Structures are given as structure tokens and as C-alpha cells.
């Protein structure tokens, strides 16, 4: 998954809702996980 | 801050993942594949780990994947469903479900029927394929149809890779539950 733009948009959808639980299915070595932590 | 449950079935890749986040308490690595049913399954290891899948490479039609990205081995891995995992871990609501399963996205969603029916997942970000890269793996239309059947709308779609013949190969899509749509998207001002 190359989620640069798509991830930015997904993050915006959730930015006002203080996410509590996220599932990263197919995490591989955790690159997208890092984005999730950063955002 | 959110707890992030990370699923990775390949033991070697999982070891790297777990080591990378060993000091991060919010990240909870799980060495299993998310699937339609719980149990075990063959997992096909690709020369590039990001290409590994519960599905083998497709055996017919044009080859849209790079020739060096072939399956080098297969192993048996543990599979679980999101419905069962969330029930067993007391997770009643997911803000985000990200699926990057090399053709296994539809199967993973099939194992999350109770969560989807309850609109317990706000946003789904899923990889999809336009043309087959894995044998019998459902394509975008199947993923979209399944989610739409549970009241999820596609919010955006991005093609990530095209074939040399110009055909869209694969990409990522965002789906939003009708509940989240109502409280967030529909609350924003309409078009001018």
C-alpha cells in the first residue's frame, strides 16, 4: 500500500474523533503503522 | 491515543515488526492472518514480502505483476476473523480498519460481518485490485459491493500502479460508514 494521499484523507476523516482502536491488517514491517502513530 | 493492532502472518516479517515497535505500548503486533474463518491456511511467501498472500499468484490471463515478484515458498499460518478477535479483546468500536492483504481484503471483511452490520467500524482503508494478481482473489467490485451492502460509502479511490499497457492494476480506497458519514461528512457545508 502506497498510502500517502489516501492516508492523509483517511486521517482527516478521523481527526476530530480521538481514535481509540485501529486495526492494521497486513502490517508487513509497519510502515503504515508509523503513519498511524504520527497522525 | 489509539491502540493499533497490527496483524502480520509471515513469522520473519512479524519479527521485524514486533522488534520495531517493542518500545511502543500502543502498537500490539499479532502473528496471524486476518481472514474469513479462524484456523490455519497456506500462506504464499513472495520474493518481496509486501507481495505475500493467502492466495497464490494467478495462473491465467496477462501477468500484471513484475516478473521478479513470484512466490518462493508457502507456509501454514494461523488465521482469525476480526469479529472474533474484537469480541475476545473487548473491542466494540474500531475507528479505522486498514487492509493491505494482497487479494485477501474481501475475505477479511467477510470475517467482520458483525462489526460491519453494527457500523462498528468508522473508516475502512482497503487495497484493491482492478485486474487479477492472485488466483481467485476478489477484485474491487466485490469489496465495494460487500461494504455497500453494510451501509458503507466509498469516499475516495486512488490508483497506485498502472500496467505497461495502461490498465489500472491496483490502488487504495477509503470507505465510510453511514453513521460516520452523518456525523462528520454530512455535517460539513454543502457545495457552494
Image: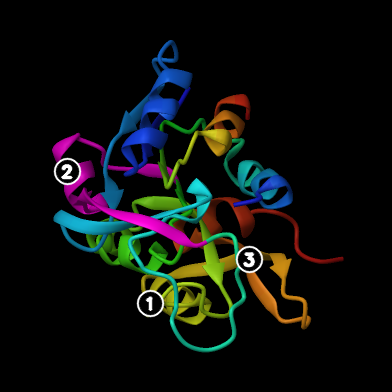
Identify the residue position indicated by label 2 in the image. B87
* Distance from Cα at disc 1 to Cα at disc 3: 34 Å
**Neighbours of disc 3 within 10 Å: few (<14), some (14-19), many (20+):** few
The image quadrant that residue A38 belongs to is: top right
Of residue B82 and residue B148, the one placed in the foreground of this image is B82
Measured Cα–Cα span from mark 3 to mark 2? 39 Å
Residue for badge 1: B149
Q: Residue at x 32, y 44 (%)?
A: B9
Q: Where is residue B34 in the image (x, y as percent from the top left)?
A: 30, 52
Image location of residue B58, percent across then percent down: 44, 78
SS at mark 2 in the image: helix
- Of residues B63 and A29, which is closer to you in this image? B63
Q: Residue furthest right?
A: B192
Q: Is residue B153 magenta?
A: no
Q: Where B94 falls versus B188 (above or below)?
A: above
Mark 1 vs 3: CB contact within 8 A: no
Q: How far apart are marks 1 and 2 (CA)?
A: 22 Å
Asked if disc 3 and disc 2 are in contact, CB closer than 8 Å, the reply is: no
Asked whether, in this view, residue B23 is left or right of residue B74, the answer is: right
SS state under label 3? loop
Q: Earlier along the polypeptide chain: callout 1 or callout 3?
A: 3
- Location of residue B106 in the rendering, given as x and y in whole percent from the top left corner: 37, 68
Q: Are marks 1 and 3 on the same chain?
A: yes
Check the picture and name the quadrant holding the C terminus of chain B: bottom right
Colour mode of the rendering: rainbow
State which region is magenta: B70-96
Magenta span includes B82: yes
Please give the residue where the numbered disc 3 appears in the rendered image.
Answer: B66
Amino acid at each position: 500500500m502506497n498510502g500517502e494521499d489516501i492516508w492523509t484523507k483517511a486521517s482527516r476523516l478521523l481527526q476530530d474523533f480521538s481514535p481509540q482502536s485501529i486495526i492494521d491488517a497486513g502490517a508487513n514491517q509497519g510502515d503504515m503503522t508509523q503513519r498511524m502513530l504520527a497522525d | 491515543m489509539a491502540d493499533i493492532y497490527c496483524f502480520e502472518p509471515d513469522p520473519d516479517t512479524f519479527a521485524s515488526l514486533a522488534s520495531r515497535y517493542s518500545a511502543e505500548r500502543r502498537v500490539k503486533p499479532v502473528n496471524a492472518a486476518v481472514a474469513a474463518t479462524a484456523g490455519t491456511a497456506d500462506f504464499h511467501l513472495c520474493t518481496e514480502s509486501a507481495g505475500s498472500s493467502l492466495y497464490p499468484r494467478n495462473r491465467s490471463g496477462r501477468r500484471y505483476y513484475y516478473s521478479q515478484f513470484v512466490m518462493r515458498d508457502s507456509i501454514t499460518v494461523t488465521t482469525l476473523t476480526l469479529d472474533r478477535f474484537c469480541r475476545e479483546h473487548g473491542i466494540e468500536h474500531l475507528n479505522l480498519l486498514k487492509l493491505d492483504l494482497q487479494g485477501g481484503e474481501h475475505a477479511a471483511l467477510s470475517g467482520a460481518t458483525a462489526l460491519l452490520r453494527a457500523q462498528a467500524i468508522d473508516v475502512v482503508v482497503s487495497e484493491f485490485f482492478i485486474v487479477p494478481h492472485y488466483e481467485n482473489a476478489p477484485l474491487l467490485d466485490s469489496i465495494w459491493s460487500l461494504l455497500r451492502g453494510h451501509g458503507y460509502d466509498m469516499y475516495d479511490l486512488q490508483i497506485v500502479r498502472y500496467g505497461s499497457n495502461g490498465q489500472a492494476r491496483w490502488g487504495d480506497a477509503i470507505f465510510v460508514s453511514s453513521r460516520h458519514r452523518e456525523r462528520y461528512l454530512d455535517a460539513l457545508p454543502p457545495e457552494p
